[in-house]
Amino acid sequence: MKNYYEYFKNTHTFNKWEQIGFKRRAGVIIPLFSIYSDKSIGIGDFYDLRFIIQWCKQCGLSLIQLLPLNDCGDDFSPYNCISSFALDPMYLCLKELKEVNISRYNKKLKELKKRYKAGLSLVDYGIKEAKIELLFELFNNSYVGGINKFEKFKLENQFWLEDYAVYSTISEITKTKNWSEWENDLRDRKPEAILNIINDYQEKVEFYKWVQWQLFEQLRSLKKFANDNGILLVGDMPFLISRNSSDVWSNRNYFNLEYSVGAPPDMYFALGQRWGMPPYNWKEIEANSYIYIKEKLKYAENFYNLYRIDHFIGIFRLWIIHNSIPEEKCGLDGKFFPEDENTWKDNGKKILEVFINSTSMLPIAEDLGSVPFCSNEVLKEFGVPGMEIQRWSKERNITYDFLKPEEIRLNSVSSLSTHDSSSFIIWWLEEAGTVDAELFRRLCAYRNITGDEYQKTVEKLFDAEHINENRLLWKSDINNIDLLCKILNKEPFEIQDIIMQYLDTYNEREKFRNYINESSTELNANFLKKALIKSMEANSIFSIHLLNEWLSLHKDYLEYFKNKRFRINYPSIQNETNWLVTVPISVNLLPYLAINKEIKEILTLTERL
């Protein structure tokens, strides 16, 4: 096994590695909204995570990565938050409130639990408004002022708390979180108008601060409980923030509101992506000594031991789309900013240096998508782990074979899937060996292969019986590039991008079965176990997997997750299940699963205990 101490000792993060140890670890990814216990009211809450911590300890997992817990307003996408600081009230455990005699409200809690049942296949986000209404009643009847911890909390979080509380109050009054639609004086933060809100709605402003204090106390307590049980918490820090957010309203000069951020087209998103969040104005942020970034990390440190930088490659450059471009064009007509590629590396190093020096937490980089060449070099220099998603970790040469465990970079997190991708199960059943149908159509259109000619080409190249109409499965007899070029009637130099798609995906299923030493194509629990073990065997210092993929080691849960509706998110696509799906088991039952012993055996085998 590799010597991680030697690898990290000369990097910028050596002191952070010393705090957590130079050991191989395994963990689980948890979207809090998707779990529940028999005590939950409508949705998973901070107290429910204690069951996850106990389960991890039993299995030997020592990392829990939480999807963002920031207040997401009424959008419910955890990556489109209305604050980089404030936590979402829907995750507050009502029975664990500080300085509140909750027993007086047991009847109302029972009524709320009956109205909003936990454990349904999809979350009913009506629970958020219902919780806030009850919390306001509790605040009115319980809070009398003079709570020392609350006063200290307000004092220590002046940078963001007042703005957030005022923003939330105005949003409630106006019934919109879109601050650009507020009356001019409020929209433009005229001091007199803001002071009037604070004076006229003093109770409501104080309430929003009180709720954040309650959330602060619960999540900070959870971190201590996790650490006392040998578990490290990994927070997920959204790199971007909603256009309709307290952050943008109160720090408009930090953002370029003429553009939206997204991602360029790739093999999984033929039209690219358009997320809607505004890009940063780094010159202004730097001019203010990066205090906005420093304060975010300072606050997050209360709750996490490590943190994941979402869309890490954005520190080098962002794919931006002008707001005038029609929504249906997604990310097609965007551009990288800055446009000068020679500046990207220095940009990223400067910003990452701020991240590293502003907190004791160790960062993890989500370096997926169209990754600039300089990214891996910078991550190695700084000692920051990137992401190695098994299905995408391949040799980029003529064979396009899956990377062997010993070929995976040490400074990485190995995983089967992400919250933005299909699960491993759906990848194997419907996507392995395929190309995106829309992407292939566009690539052919660039060569004037359209209409009937395009249709005939598809029929010659792809299996007509493939079950996923959005993915094209190569026929087995398209077994060389010469044949591909002949069918397309093009020379190799004319279709390099199509050839790369072909090399990346043709015969992918056979390659993967050889990779995990599996003779059968049937997806069963043993097949999944072999894929997990192969990922866990990687050089990667961490290996973290979605909860549903750990659970799928149980054959009954594997069958449940074969339904592709259980996908956490489809980026840039509005549908009926994004950020809504739940797991099919109460977390307080996790300790009784037969697979727990099997998970521990896998960790022992791969030296991650």
Image (cartoon, rainbow, N blue to C red):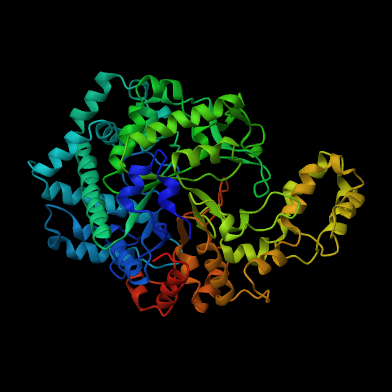
Nearer the observer, 313 or 159 = 313
Query: In terms of image quadrants, where is residue 250?
Result: top left
Q: Position of residue 15 (x, y in %)?
A: 33, 43
Q: Position of residue 120 (x, y in %)?
A: 42, 67
Q: Residue at x 61, y 60 (%)?
A: 404
Residue 191 against residue 210 in the figure, above or below: above
Residue 76 visible in image: no
Q: Position of residue 458 (x, y in %)?
A: 84, 55
Query: In terms of image quadrants, where is residue 197?
Result: top left
> From the viewer's perspective, is 452 left or right of 143?
right
Nearer the observer, 175 or 82 = 82
Residue 68 against residue 337 in the figure, above or below: below
- Quadrant (top left/top right/bottom left/bottom right) for the C terminus: bottom left
Residue 526 visible in image: yes
The count of marks equals 0
Q: Residue at x 39, y 68 (%)?
A: 119
Q: Position of residue 274 (x, y in %)?
A: 58, 39
> From the viewer's perspective, is 3 left or right of 295?
right
